[in-house]
Image (tube, helix red, strand yellow):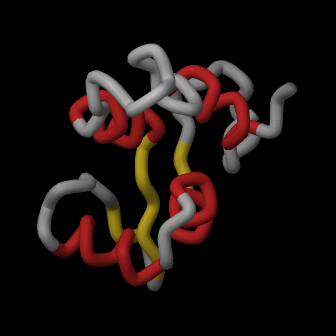
Amino acid sequence: MSENGSASGTNDWFSVPTIAAELGLSRQSIYNLIENEELPAFRLGGSYRIRGADFREYLATHKVGRVAGKQGRLKLSVKERLRVLRGEK
């Protein structure tokens, strides 16, 4: 389920702290990605929100083809990361 309560995944939105925790980065790193226009975001009131589709696209475009010793797979697929973000098992 997304932060806005939508289980469909079509209108999922994430906060900067959520994205930072998922990627294991600092909040400032996520703000830098937003400011450098690498990660699209919307400013709503005093905070940013990132659309799930934009986050998935960012992950897909930054995927590395091979990770040494991992048979060409990253630790978690985009689908697996989204399950974690939504709190699904």
Q: Tell me if residue 16 comes above or below residue 4 in the rendering.
A: below
Q: Residue furthest top?
A: 71
> Which one is in front, 26 or 5?
26
Residue 19 screen position, x and y as percent: 53, 58
* Left or right: where 65 falls relative to 30: left
Q: Tell me if residue 35 comes above or below residue 4 in the rendering.
A: below
Report which quarter residue 35 is drawn in: bottom left
> Which one is in front, 31 or 22?
22
Report which quarter residue 45 is drawn in: bottom left
For image coordinates 45% across by 84% down, the residue present is: 46
Location of the C terminus (image quadrant): top right
Q: Residue furthest right?
A: 89
Residue 37 screen position, x and y as percent: 14, 61
Q: Residue furthest front?
A: 69
* Left or right: where 36 falls relative to 12: left
For image coordinates 82% across by 29% down, the residue present is: 88
Report which quarter residue 2 is drawn in: top right
Q: Tell me if residue 52 comes above or below residue 77 in the rendering.
A: below
For image coordinates 36% across by 75% down, the residue present is: 29
> Which one is in front, 83 or 50?
83
Location of the N terminus (image quadrant): top right
Report the label total.
Answer: 0
Residue 16 screen position, x and y as percent: 50, 68
Residue 71 screen position, x and y as percent: 46, 15
For image coordinates 62% across by 63% down, the residue present is: 21
